[in-house]
Structures are given as C-alpha cells and as structure tokens.
Amino acid sequence: MSVAEVAPARGWPRLRLLRGELWLIFGRRRNWAGLAVLAAVPVVIAVAIRIADPVAGAGGPEFFTRITGNGFFVALAALSACLTLFLPLAVAVIAGDAIAGEAHTGTLRYLLTVPVGRTTLLAVKGVAVAAFTVTAVLLIAAVGLLAGGLLFGGGPVTLLSGQQVGLGGGLLRLLLICGYLGVALCALGAVGLFVSTLTEQPIGASIAVLMLTMASFVLDSIPQLAWLHPYLLTHWWTAFGDLLRSPIYLPDLQRGLLSAGAYIVIFWTAAWARFAGRDITS
C-alpha cells in the first residue's frame, strides 16, 4: 500500500500527504514488529540483570553496572546497546523504503499526481523518517524507565562525574539524550533517503545504508585512521554520555550536532538533486 492510497481525501495537500505518510509508516505491521523488538531490548536487559549474579556483572559497561542501584540506567543501557545495530537497522529500513518502496510497488507516479511538487514530497518523506526515528529512540527510553523502575526502583541519579541530581533532573538529561540521538540518527535517515532515490529495490537500499553504518563503525575503531574519525557518521554518537556530567561537557556534543546537521543538509540536498531530475517510470 502507498501513501497515495491512504492519504485522506480532504485537507491541505501537504498536510494530507504528511498524514498519509505517517499512517503508512506507523500503520504497517512490520514496522510495529520492529518497534516491538526495540521495546523488548530494555526489558531483556532489566530482567537479565535482575536474575543474574551481581558479581558476574562487575566490571561491565558503565551504564550496566549502575542498574542495580537505580533502574533509571536501564534506559541508558538499552539506548547504548541499540545504538550499534537495532536503531541503525530500524532507520535504514524505513529510510531505504521511502522512495524505493514507492517505485518498487509502482505507486510513485500516482503519488506525484497529488498537487505538491517533488521537493515537498521529498521533504514529507524526510519528516516522516525523522518522526519514526525519534519515536524509536523515545520508545526505548520510556520502556527502559518503566522496566527499570519496576525491577530496581528509582531515586536520585548519580552522574558519570560523581554528582547526584534528583530524579527530575535525571529525566531532563535523559530527554536531552533522546533529542541528541534523534538528531544523530536523522542524519542516517538522510543518507538512507538519498540511497532510496538511487534504486527501485527497497531491500537493497536498506542493506546499503546498514552496510555504510557498519563500515563507519569499523573505520572508527582503527587508530591509524584517527584523522578520518571526526568526519564519520557514527563517530559522535556516543558523545551523549557527556550529558550525564556536571557541568555538561559541550564541545563533543556541539561537534556531534554540527556533524549530524552537515550530513542532513548534504544528503537531503543530494536526494533532492537526484529525485528532482529523475524520470519516474513506475
């Protein structure tokens, strides 16, 4: 089913198109299944740590070792765990399907009969991908908070720098982390949108975006390529931990946002240049 088929018959064309696109993304069972897998990650982490031997987890990753003392850290541990595979995979699937999926099913020509231009259509696709991305990040955080609170309780949050803040302050920092990761992953969505304009095979586009992400992780782990690291898509993703310091360490966060913004502008522009002059045959 295409957004052209689900868009309501009345309303301002741009809003109608956006509503249809959002309905297309959030109404598909496969996307619900993907969100369910993401939501299951914090639950699995919380349950596993709850039933595990506390001594066995000593010396593990920073967020994981703090979970038994405060369930707040389940959300952070889940976000950290999903950032290397599950979140990039989810974004790659949605972004890769944005244009290529319409072309593959033969509905792209009909979609362009809606009284909006190609630029608007591409912008709507980008906004919808961004909406899914932010929703996925917030879902992991929310389920992590719920699971952690039920199994380990809450209370004041001890920051990575050693200071304590109240639960309200911790929740505010978690919201900022979700915002930062949302922007970072929207950059990946922009790359996926561009790749989606290059092919009529959505699966191929999704795989290509995921492979590019994995390649970025691999290159980022090679010390001899340190000069390249600041320019890699994934390099600044883990800088979200700086939001858990007092005071917040801003330099890496600023570089991360600047990098993500540059990727969004460059690849959305590339997608527009490709899509605006493309002959639509399907």
Image (tube, rainbow, N blue to C red):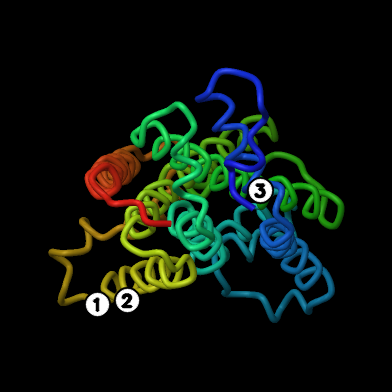
Position of residue 172 in the picture relative to residue 85 (left or right): right
Query: Is 18 rendered above or below residue 253?
Result: above
Position of residue 197 in the picture relative to residue 60 (left or right): left
Q: Name the residue nearer the viewer: 135 or 33.
A: 33
Number of the label disc, if any, that sits on residue 33: none
Which residue in the protein does label 2 denote? 218
Find the distance from the CA under tag 3 to the CA under tag 2. 26 Å
Location of residue 51 in the rendering, given as x and y in whole percent from the top left corner: 84, 74
- Sequence order check: which comes first, mark 3 or mark 1? 3
Q: Residue at x 42, y 51 (%)?
A: 189
* Dot 3 alpha-carbon crowd within 10 angstroms: few under 14, some 14 to 19, many 20 or more: many
Query: Is 128 rendered above or below residue 65?
Result: above
What's the amino acid at mark 2? Val
Find the distance from the CA under tag 2 to the CA under tag 1. 7 Å
Q: Name the residue nearer the viewer: 106 or 176.
A: 106
What's the amino acid at mark 3? Ala
- Discs 2, 1 touching: Cβ within 8 Å: yes
Find the distance from the CA under tag 3 to the CA under tag 1. 30 Å
Which residue in the protein does label 1 denote? 222
